[in-house]
Image (spheres, rainbow, N blue to C red):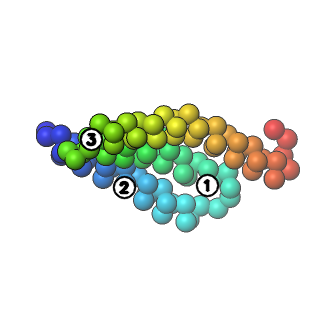
Amino acid sequence: MTLALLADVLTWSGAAIAVAAGLRLLLTRGAAARLHTVAPVTALAAPLLIGGLALRPWSSWHDVAKLAVIAVLLAATGPAAVVTAGQAVERAAGRPE
């Protein structure tokens, strides 16, 4: 498998997961259920897209460095943002934590 083909597979896989999650989000009711619906985007689609873009033949070292910074920021802030949003949903619903 060539590097360009691997990059294409990773990029299109990530895009397909993001689109599927977006379409599923349209049919999901309730804030807590929506948080679970979009979880695959941060957990799976974003790393696949970043990996695919980093492996593109036209990527230079500074492109890959920027993508690595984005990946680290997503990994560091994604779970915390989902937990905070979940806590806000629970408080808005009037349920104790």
What's the residue type where badge 2 is placed?
A: Ala
Q: Secondary structure at mark 1?
A: helix
- How many neighbours does mark 2 have within 10 angstroms: few (below 14), some (14-19), or many (20 or more)? some
Q: CA distance from mark 3 to mark 2?
A: 25 Å
Please tell me which residue is depicted at 36% across the width and 47% down the height of the picture. 49
Q: CA distance from mark 2 to mark 1?
A: 18 Å
Residue 29 spot, x, y in % from top left: 64, 61
Left or right relative to 91: residue 2 = left
Residue sticking out furthest to the left: 1
What's the residue type where badge 1 is placed?
A: Arg
Left or right relative to 21: residue 86 = right
Residue 89 spot, x, y in % from top left: 75, 50
Asked if disc 1 and disc 3 are in contact, CB closer than 8 Å, the reply is: no
| Residue 44 visible, this angle | no
Left or right relative to 77: residue 15 = left
- Label 1 sits on residue: 34
Please identify, in this view, whether the residue under mark 3 or under mark 2 is nearer the observer.
Answer: 3
- Label 3 sits on residue: 60
Please identify, in this view, whether the residue under mark 1 or under mark 3 is nearer the observer.
Answer: 3
Q: Nearer the N terminus, badge 2 or badge 1?
A: 2
Please tell me which residue is depicted at 31% across the width and 41% down the height of the picture. 54
Asked if disc 2 and disc 1 are in contact, CB closer than 8 Å, the reply is: no
Residue 56 spot, x, y in % from top left: 24, 45
Quadrant location, the N terminus: top left
Q: Secondary structure at mark 3?
A: loop
- How many neighbours does mark 1 have within 10 angstroms: few (below 14), some (14-19), or many (20 or more)? some
- Label 2 sits on residue: 16
Query: In which quarter of the view is residue 81 placed?
Result: top right
Quadrant location, the C terminus: top right
Residue 15 spot, x, y in % from top left: 37, 54
